[in-house]
């Protein structure tokens, strides 16, 4: 037990270790943030193409989106990361953080697209019919009626997807990137502290707190969006 | 009294995939008429009604509204003149009662927001729901929702209002409220088409009954003849079961 506490003291009193942890954490956050951004934007585009009314302009885009989502969801994230690093971006000197952001962004887009698609499709058809019967345009119906209701269905699942991306970025350590996960392993290794337990638990706490904060924010947003569901008046 | 013909339908057919629901319907509707569409379930009566404002796009046939051929390019404009009240109310869940009423008139530039809100308030006062103006639909009872939905249809001053089983999803107590509001709209001279299972209401309100079976109009006539002296065996059989 003594050595456990002395390890804690050692970790938090060695500036190099703290520095490594924070650097790793920063990389985790950067990769996650930009990947989620790409995921949400690209995922929205894919979802909109997918739910749009079939027309001859959209036949090919719809097909591409379906194949894309199928391939991404049907193969392991780690393999997609390897393909990005060792085949598609196998260029010396290309910044690995960019490759990781693209790999996770493209992956997240497929899942986000499904989340958004499901959210849009779960809006009752009667809501669209009400708009149509009133003579409203498809555009007005989408932006004033369907989208606001879809967002309510989308937010909880999107929160899940964000959390998944943050945790999944830990596999960048497999391609030698120095993220939070890698930092914990490095600090605990033989050349450094020679004990994994404290750095790894510390990394775990970093992940936990981050994800807890995100869930908290998502819950708040959910709650404020649910205003119109309440059976009582405002 | 010579009334204008508002709606002419010729050879209307509708199928969903291989399932033929309407098999050629010819129909005319004149101003001030109140047509109740009756028929067994699965007869296509709701589909018939829903084809009129293209909630379902007809598979074949022609439709003229005030003499103008209806097709996909002008249906949006024509829908403004055809109000619709749905079985499941279809109030817009993310909008308050007031926003439900003013959305279309304002978006379609039929009225300024201030005018629309004034009209909405007057109508809400009239049906005793002004206190719900800022409430969301989820906080209303079924009967209240349907009455708001009827008022929403009135906001655009349509020439016809279609009622698709307006009381089928209601508890017995609120059915009366909704029927009396429909009765009031009828008394103001509004042209109506109603699909319903409320036989006594049909008898009372209709100027004409249309009986649909297997996607065709089997018989039509004024309520007295229809209910007391049905011409076809199919209607006789139907009336024996429901009355």
Image: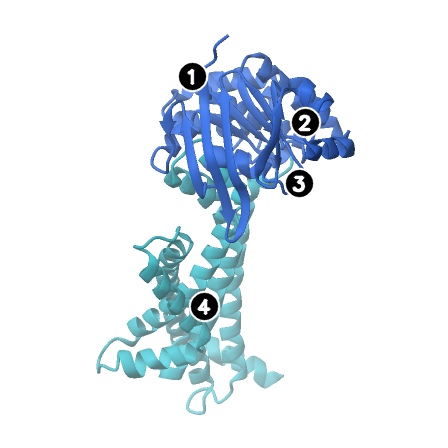
Chain colours: A cyan, B blue
Tell me where residue B222 sits by quadrant.
top right
Name the residue at 47% across, 85% down. Answer: A188
Residue count near mark 1 (Cα–Cα under 10 Å), binned few <14, some 14–19, many ≥20: some
Q: Real-space Cα distance between discs 3 and 1?
A: 42 Å
Tell which residue pokes out farthest to the top in this image. Answer: B1
Please name which of the two marks, 1 or 4, marks the residue nearer to the observer.
Answer: 1
Query: Residue beneath label 4, please?
Result: A166
Q: Secondary structure at mark 4?
A: helix
The chain that hosts pointer 4 is A
**Mark 3: few, some, or many residues within 10 Å (few <14, many ≥20)?**
few
Residue at mark 1: B115
Q: Is residue B54 above or below residue A116?
A: above
Q: Is residue B117 above or below residue B16?
A: above
Residue B237 or residue A14, whichever sits in front: B237
- Measured Cα–Cα span from mark 2 to mark 3: 21 Å
Distance from Cα at disc 1 to Cα at disc 4: 51 Å
Answer with mark 2 or mark 3, whichever residue precedes in sequence.
Answer: 3
Q: Secondary structure at mark 2?
A: loop
Q: Earlier in the sequence, mark 3 or mark 1?
A: 3
Chain where mark 1 sits: B
CA–CA distance in space, label 2 to label 4: 73 Å
Q: Name the residue beneath numbered marker 3.
A: B41
Q: Indicate the chain on which mark 2 is placed.
A: B
């Amino acid at each position: 037990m003594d050595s456990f506490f002395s390890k804690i003291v050692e970790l938090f009193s060695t500036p190099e270790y703290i520095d490594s942890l924070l650097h790793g954490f920063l990389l985790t956050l950067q990769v996650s943030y930009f990947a989620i951004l790409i995921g949400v934007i690209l995922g929205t585009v894919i979802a909109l193409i997918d739910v749009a009314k079939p027309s001859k302009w959209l036949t090919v885009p719809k097909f591409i989106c379906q194949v894309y989502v199928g391939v991404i969801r049907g193969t392991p994230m780690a393999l997609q990361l390897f393909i990005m690093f060792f085949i598609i971006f196998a260029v010396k000197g290309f910044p690995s953080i960019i490759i990781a952001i693209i790999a996770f962004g493209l992956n997240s887009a497929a899942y986000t697209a499904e989340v958004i698609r499901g959210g849009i499709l779960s809006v009752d058809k009667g809501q669209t019919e009400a708009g149509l019967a009133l003579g409203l345009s498809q555009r007005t119906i989408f932006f004033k009626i369907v989208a606001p209701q879809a967002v309510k269905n989308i937010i909880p699942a999107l929160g899940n997807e964000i959390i998944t991306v943050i945790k999944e970025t830990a596999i960048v350590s497999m391609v030698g990137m120095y993220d939070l996960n890698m930092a914990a392993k490095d600090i605990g290794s033989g050349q450094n502290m020679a004990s994994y337990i404290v750095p790894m638990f510390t990394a775990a706490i970093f992940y936990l707190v981050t994800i807890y904060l995100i869930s908290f924010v998502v819950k708040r947003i959910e709650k404020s969006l649910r205003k119109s569901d309440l059976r009582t008046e405002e | 009294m010579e009334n204008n013909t508002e709606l002419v339908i010729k050879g209307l057919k509708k199928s969903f995939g291989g399932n033929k629901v309407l098999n050629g319907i010819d129909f005319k509707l004149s101003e001030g008429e109140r047509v109740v569409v009756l028929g067994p379930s699965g007869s296509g009566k709701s589909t018939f009604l829903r084809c009129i404002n293209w909630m379902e796009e007809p598979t074949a046939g022609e439709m003229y509204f005030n003499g103008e051929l209806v097709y996909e390019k002008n249906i949006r404009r024509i829908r403004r003149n055809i109000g619709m009240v749905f079985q499941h109310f279809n109030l817009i869940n993310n909008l308050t009662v007031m926003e439900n009423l003013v959305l279309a008139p304002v978006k379609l530039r039929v009225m300024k927001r201030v005018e629309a809100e004034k009209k909405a308030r007057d109508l809400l006062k009239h049906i005793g729901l002004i206190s719900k103006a800022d409430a969301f639909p989820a906080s209303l009872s079924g009967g209240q929702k349907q009455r708001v939905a009827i008022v929403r249809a009135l906001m655009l001053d349509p020439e016809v209002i279609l009622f698709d089983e307006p009381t089928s999803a209601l508890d017995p107590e609120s059915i009366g409220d909704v029927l009396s509001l429909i009765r009031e709209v009828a008394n103001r001279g509004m042209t109506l088409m109603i699909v319903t299972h409320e036989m006594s209401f049909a008898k009372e309100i209709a100027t004409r009954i249309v009986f649909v079976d297997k996607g065709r109009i089997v018989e039509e006539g004024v309520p007295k003849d229809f209910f007391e002296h049905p011409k076809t065996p199919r209607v006789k059989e139907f009336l024996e079961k429901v009355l």
